[in-house]
Image (tube, rainbow, N blue to C red):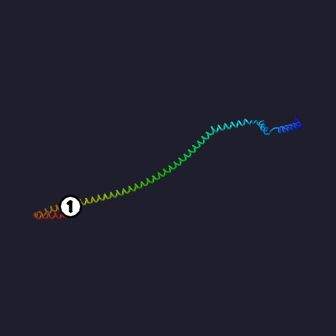
Amino acid sequence: MISLPVLAEVTGQVAEATAAHAASVNPITELIRGFGINFGVNLPAIIGQIVNFCIVAFVLWKFAFKPVLATLDERQKKIADGLRYAEETKTRLDSAQQEIADTLKKAQIEAAAIIEQARKASKELAEREAAAATERAGGIITTAQQAIELEKQKMLAEARTEIARLVIATTQRVLSKELNDADRSRYNEAAARELTSA
């Protein structure tokens, strides 16, 4: 075992040696050497590793990350374009559906107007045809009445003639015994004159 006085003496000697050594050496060099000895850091190796890392990072950026990012940007642009196109298509579809609805509404209104006009025209035509049929029927009735009247007058004339002939014949028979030929002729002519004048 080391005694305390010996330990104190050794510690004092180390402190003196350290102080003498510190006075003779550059503190920065000693600090760097101290780090190298204490931490195992090799400055040229670290600088080489930093340069290697920068080269690898540049190569990865140039040939890996940049194309991947460009592809991602392109895909995002395509997706955005697709969404914009879908939105435009939806807008156009809504517009087309609205136009179709408006066109159908106009067509229904026009069809209703055409149907109403057709109804009015058919009603007017039916009324005109009914009036024309009534007029034709009236004309036919008038013609028939005239024909009946003519037939009636003709029949009356024939009946009068027949009656006159019968009257003359009967008168001749009744009067043939009592009248002479001159009187008979005179009666016949008078009866014929009266029948024809009536």
Count of labels in the image: 1
User: Horizontal placement of 73 versus 106: left or right?
Assistant: right
Task: Pinpoint residue 127: horizontal percent, then vertical percent.
Answer: 36, 57
Foreground residue among 34 and 141:
34
User: Horizontal placement of 14 versus 174: left or right?
Assistant: right
| Relative vertical location of residue 97 with respect to residue 27 in this rendering, above or below | below
Task: Pinpoint residue 45: horizontal percent, then vertical percent.
Answer: 72, 35
Q: Quadrant of residue 172?
A: bottom left
Task: Pinpoint residue 69: horizontal percent, then vertical percent.
Answer: 62, 41
- Image quadrant occupied by the N terminus: top right
| Relative vertical location of residue 137 with respect to residue 96 in this rendering, above or below | below
**Residue topped by disc 1:** 157
Foreground residue among 57 and 110:
57
Q: Quadrant of residue 192?
A: bottom left
Foreground residue among 70 and 91:
70
Q: Residue at x 20, y 61 (%)?
A: 157
Element type at mark 1: helix
| Relative vertical location of residue 54 with respect to residue 155 in this rendering, above or below | above
Task: Pinpoint residue 175: horizontal percent, then vertical percent.
Answer: 12, 64
User: Horizontal placement of 114 versus 171: left or right?
Assistant: right
Judged from this view, the residue extending furthest toward the right is 5
- Image quadrant occupied by the C terminus: bottom left
Mark 1, other Cα within 10 Å: few <14 / some 14–19 / many ≥20 = some
Q: Amino acid at mark 1?
A: Ala
